[in-house]
Image: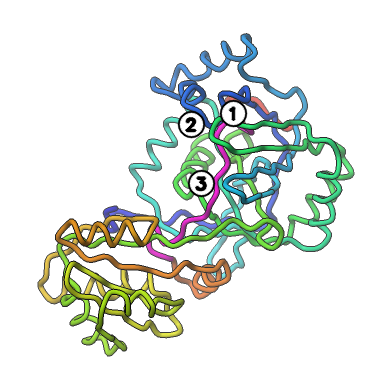
Amino acid sequence: MDESAVVCPPALAGPVVLHPFRALHLAADRVGSAAGARAFASPHGRVPQRLAGWLREGLAVEEDTPAVWVHEYTARGMTVRGVVGALDLSRQAVPGATPAVLPHERVLPAQVDELERRMHQMQLQPAAILLAHRAGPQQRSLVDRVVAGEPDLEVDDPSGQRHRAWAVTDPATADELARCLAGTQALIADGHHRYAAYLRLCAEHGADGPWGRGLAMLVDHDDTPLFLGAIHRLLRGASVADLVDRARAHGLDVRTGSRAQALEALDRQVLVVADRRDAAWIRVPADRLPVELLHHDLLPALAAAGLPSPAVDHLHTADQALSGADNAAGTAVLLPALELDEVMRVLRAGRLLPEKATSFQPKPSVGVLMRPVRDGVDDRT
């Protein structure tokens, strides 16, 4: 990722509002599958016609009644449950105000452009962005009541995920849920580029129309939390010695030793660097996160010292990063996984995390709950 090209999408002001929408579902054997993905293939302008054909053939179903949904999915032994609706995008946060929906990463404008164009041509929001928050007891009790009933949708998809979803159409329950959400503050866990594309479409087509809302799933981190994993780095063109020199020049506590010693030292305030020959671990000050120190201090310090800026690969396991260091001219940087509260603390301090700082898992398969968006058609009524 070219960090010189990234921009930060704006936060949203409260209250958080999830509008009902007319959900579109793919048939069970097409959810999260290659067969289902063909519905969204290029040319994207033909997606509405493809989906119309699938509806006629019984390969997809569109609900007649708008609803907010409770969606529960289980993947690799983890169950995640959240409230799915059309997030109101009309109120962007102003400086100095407390935001209600917070991005924590910047985005690439070119990727946002492509997603904006694709969604508008498809007339569809095919996947919800994931929002993480801490729900209050009233909301948790309400969700428990909803899921105690029979689900309106049950799907075992080809990828191995199991889905259950309940449509919330009762006006009293919907009103109670809206009151619960009004004061919440949520972090964008996954979908920053789609969120930025939502905002572009809202600005271009009007906040009062159907593009003034974006499909979102709000997950209670205290009930069924998403797993927050680390994303490690492989720096191609940098050595452990280069990073150690720069870290010591910054007055950081740096230790060198074997790779095994370095791996044992990895913890919440320590990052580990290892190449083919050397290994070291760097202790990070308490007011910073290791991923911040790497991208905001150490990598710029390499350039300031006249060293080439390394290419950065992002890898989801330490083994992948270390294997890359052994097989390429580069250095593995192992980072600790973050906690939700750590991310929120950075945002409340007015900072953003570097790109690819977090990996929230598992994500739901595409096709269970999608939102058709037709210009001039309000899906709330």
C-alpha span from label 1 to label 3 = 15 Å
Q: Quadrant of residue 25?
A: top right
**What span is colored magenta in the figure?**
353-370
Label 3 close to label 2 by CB (< 8 Å) = no
Count of marks, rendered view: 3
- 323 up-or-down from 364: above or below: below
Q: Is residue 360 magenta?
A: yes
- Res 121 seen here: no
Q: Quadrant of residue 7?
A: bottom left
**Badge 2: residue crowd in 10 Å (few <14, some 14–19, many ≥20):** many
- 310 up-or-down from 254: above or below: above
Relative placement, left or right, of 360 versus 273 is right
Residue 119, which numbered label? 2
Pointer 3 residue: 195
Pointer 1 residue: 373
Label 1 close to label 2 by CB (< 8 Å) = yes
User: What main secondary structure does the magenta stretch of the protein show?
Assistant: loop
Residue closer to the observer: 213 or 301: 301
Q: Secondary structure at mark 1?
A: loop
Identify the image quadrant of the C terminus: top right
C-alpha span from label 3 to label 2 = 12 Å
